[in-house]
C-alpha cells in the first residue's frame, strides 16, 4: 500500500474563486484546483458577496471565508471529498 506524499510547497494558494457551481484555488506553481461547490454547503449557501471575500490564510495553504466560518485547505481539494452534510445535487433533488 502506498500513501500520497504532498510537499508543503505544492500547497501554496495565491487566490480563490467561487463560481455558481465550483470552487477554484489558483496555486503558486500555476495549477488550478477545482472542486464542486456542493462539497461545501456553507459556501454554497453564502451570498455572492460573501463568497467573494475569500482570504488566503497566513501559512498560504488554505483559504478562509471568515464571515461564514468556512476554511478550506489546498490539501482538502487535492485529496478530494465533500464536507460533512454535503448532498450531491441529484440526490438533493429527490
Image: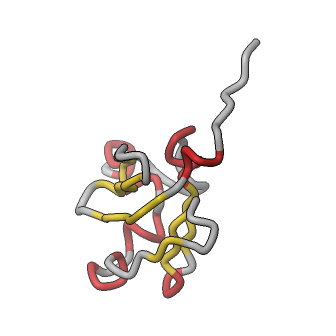
Q: Which sits in the foreground, 65 or 39?
A: 65
Residue in the image at 54% along x and 42% along y: 81
In the image: residue 74, left or right of residue 59: left
Q: Is residue 7 above or below residue 37?
A: above
Q: Residue at (38%, 44%) from the top-left corner?
A: 91
At 51% from the left and 67% from the top, the residue drawn is 63
Name the image quarter holding residue 10.
Answer: top right
Number of numbered discs: 0
The percent position of residue 65, horizontal first and vertical second, equals 48, 78
Q: Is residue 76 left or right of residue 37?
A: right
Tell me the quadrant of the picture where the N terminus can be found: top right
Considering every residue shown, the one lying at the far top of the view is: 1
- Say which quarter of the image contains residue 22: bottom left
Give how far across and how far down residue 53 sits, in percent.
38, 82
**Which residue is pictured at 59% across the width and 47% down the height?**
9
Q: Quadrant of residue 83?
A: bottom right
Q: Nearer the viewer, residue 3 or 21?
A: 3
Amino acid at each position: 500500500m502506498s500513501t500520497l506524499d504532498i510537499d508543503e510547497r505544492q500547497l501554496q494558494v495565491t487566490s480563490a474563486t467561487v463560481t455558481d457551481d465550483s470552487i477554484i484555488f489558483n496555486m503558486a506553481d500555476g495549477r488550478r484546483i477545482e472542486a464542486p461547490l456542493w462539497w461545501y454547503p456553507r459556501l454554497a449557501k453564502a451570498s455572492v458577496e460573501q463568497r467573494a471575500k475569500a482570504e488566503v490564510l497566513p501559512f498560504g495553504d488554505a483559504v478562509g471565508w471568515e464571515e461564514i466560518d468556512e476554511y478550506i485547505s489546498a490539501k482538502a481539494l487535492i485529496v478530494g471529498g465533500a464536507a460533512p452534510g454535503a448532498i450531491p445535487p441529484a440526490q438533493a433533488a429527490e
